[in-house]
Amino acid sequence: MKPALSLLIALVLSSLSFSCSEQKNSDDAQGPQVIDGRQSLRGSSTAGNLMATAILEHYKVDMAFYPSSLIKDDSIALIEPGMNPAQVKEKVLQLYPSDRQDELMIGTLSGRDIRKFILNRTSDAYQIDLQVAGLEYDLQFTGGLPTVYQITRSHGLPLEDQKNYRVAINRYFYGIPYSFPGYQYRNSFENSFEREPGSYSARTALSSFLERFRQVPLLKEKRANISERVIGSHAEPLTIGAIQGRSHLSPWAGYSVSTEGIITAVASKTDGGMEIYIQGAEDDNDPLSSNALNIYLSKARTDLKVGQLIGVRGVVYEIMTAEGLTRTALREVSELTIKASNLPLPASLVIGGADGLRVPSRAISSFRGNLNQKALLEPKDGVDFWETLEAMRVRVAKPRVVGFRGGKEKFDDEKSGYMTILVVPEAADTPAERTAADGTFLDPLTGNYTPEVLRIVANELAPEVTTDLVFNVGDRFEQDLEGILSFQTNTFGSGEYVFYVTGSFTTPRSGVKPIDQRQITRLVADEDHLTYATWNVENLSGDKRERIKKIAEAIQTNLLCPDIVTLPEIQDNNGVKFEGGSAANETLASIIAAINCPGTAYQPINIDPVPNQDGGEPGGNIRVAMIYNAKRVQFTPWGTSAPLSETFLLPNGRLNQNPGRLHPNDPAFRRSRKPLVAEFTFRGSRIVTIGNHLNSKLGDASLWQAEQPAEMGSERQRSLMATRIHSFVAELLQQDPSAHVLVSGDFNAYWYENSMRLLAGDRLQNLMTYADLVPKNDWYTTNYDGGSSAIDFIFASRAFLNRRPELEILHINSNFMGKLSDHDPVISRFYFGSIP
């Protein structure tokens, strides 16, 4: 019998808020207990319960999370009350790792974020990823979807969505510098986890716990459990198209079904399993239904090859990402037989070019609501277009490179273990939608969300796509590329449609371009001209010596030694280490020492933030700093200039301190960088600069998510910030209308967003959009997921607009691999000579 799709969807949606649990017995056990690390990935184990309980008790947190994968799955131990340190070390600690994997972090998470954390980590591989204390969870999956789940505090106490809980997590799995992307980016802890200072050890907690207790708590209780429900079995074979259905969710999700198809791609996985793609031998003539399917085997087979016709029975899964979109697949395979071999592969569908399928090039989705409740796909929408091709063989017509992630993307990182090349099929966009370098614009103002961008990924199914390859924006493939179109969870936990190039992959002849062969400004400082630049230097700390040298080289070679440079994302001296405070004097001194600009004497302007209070990489203490050429501009410090001392205007219109941080105690700037204001003098004129780095878009929903339209909640905080900055500027100009004011930096907002309108008001002008200073095909400073956009600006007051302003955006990073930063610098020049 065909399942009721509406019931399945209702179960999925209701799971987002449902939670309950039975009371559990917490009586103490009196005697010795066996601690077993085996099968920790299948449920809560005594080894996992012991460690999580020890962490919870020792550090007095509300909840403790310990990674199941850190527990040795081939070891057991015996514990008893009152063990001495030697016994603990010899018998118990050998179950758990030491060194970096032993480190913990303590901070707060909301109940809502804890619920998402458990669900996402468990859904990744349908395993118990986290051993817990202070929490209990029981998840039931139906066809890969979390149809019912129970997540509560211990003993059935409710987990309140809006309440903050003090939790302990593993630092190694948090992310940088030990792993990537970890909880920080994979689970959005960058925006939700508020870390406390200090260093913590899981093994220390366990040793103290075992030595202190005279009665060891019961550790056999089931705190974490997952189960998988099969709705039923359909006896007669189904076509692949019937299994895929004509919407985002299969109508057969959760059912055991059988089908057949020709293997079009096959590869062993690192987990010991195997991934297979099959496609119907004949076209199903249904433009809304894919004729191909993904199959996962838990154990690899050596007899399966491309070109074989196989019959297969398994459970239909919808493998869901954090954003709610899915990949249809067969898992729990119970039967697989080879029916024929050496068959011709089904013809590939051509995408792009003169005669291929036309990719939507503007809207990701015109649907409003949850895409999983949509009755039929609409190929005019980008997300639906790609869904109709899920798992099928495709041929992408001579694609053009518009971006990249991973590999050799960055100058100073070791080669990443992943690689994504972002491309646009030939003729899939128009010249008006392209940048000057043949990238593609992301422009939500005109409804252009770049759904035509396709992701070529390194994968076992794409043997010729490796992390050694180098690309630059604008590179073109001279031949069509053939492979499999699929949907996967990416490194950051988001879902994306990807292209596995299974055929030949002859790449354009690109290489990492030296910095002196990238764009060089024509805006040079001289006796009559002041030059001012802003450049987000992406987490630049004092221990990144080689990148500091390259940043300095770019300041002298590409920016040609500006008079003043605002530098968002300067980190402290030792980077992401939590020790050593937040001082960045060595970072800035190293930059200045490496700049080789004849006739200059650069000096730093910096106020160290309160440690770990301004967001960014934990331990990095990013802030906005400045450097200036003291031989060209004059800077006189005064006042206290402390991290939390308020900057305000005196009755005479002067700053109470120079430099200062604006609104350091205002809730609008909580967990974000505070603007840095400094006053200079150039040729007798008062120059006031305000450097900024507003809150990022990382907390926003993905454009490629089930719930449409995506909510961009981060803009609310930026609007508050912009209002505060504008008020300060307006007051300054009210008292001193002749003041020359520049407000610049990384605003993490597009030029037309509400926050940027609030910032400008009637007092400031964004120079990028002013008087055709910059051609529109150069309006970009970053490249995210293949979409080029501008989020770094220089705003000028009227006094500067009367100084013959000039502006350039130097595309020395966003178009290139081997980039020094993920932002391009912006440079301006103003005339201070005599005006006839």
Image: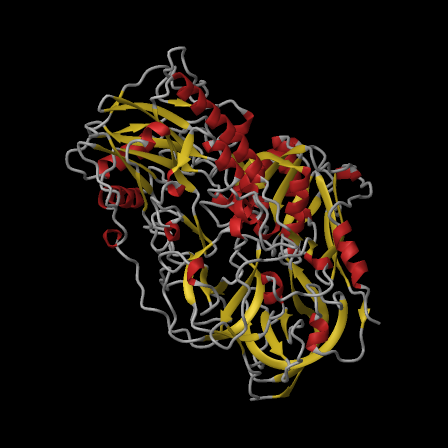
Is the residue 379 above or below the residue 236 in the image? above
Q: From the viewer's perspective, tell me whether residue 225 is left or right of residue 572.
A: right
Most extreme residue toward the left, as rendered?
Answer: 599
Q: How many marks?
A: 0
Residue 220, position in %: x, y? 74, 46
Residue lying at 35% horizontally and 62% vertically, measured from the top left = 470
Does residue 92 appear in the picture of this structure?
Answer: yes
Q: Residue at x 59, y 45 (%)?
A: 91
- Residue 759 pos. (x, y %): 47, 32
Q: Is residue 707 above or below residue 797?
A: below
The quarter of the picture where the C terminus appears is top left
Q: Quadrant of the N terminus?
A: bottom right
Q: Is residue 169 above or below residue 325?
A: above
The image position of residue 353, as x and y in percent, is 47, 74
- Residue that sits furthest to the right in the current view: 1
Which residue is the extreme one toward the front?
Answer: 836
Quarter of the rendering containing residue 656? top left
Residue 641 x, y percent position in the rendering: 38, 19
Residue 29 visible in the shown view: no
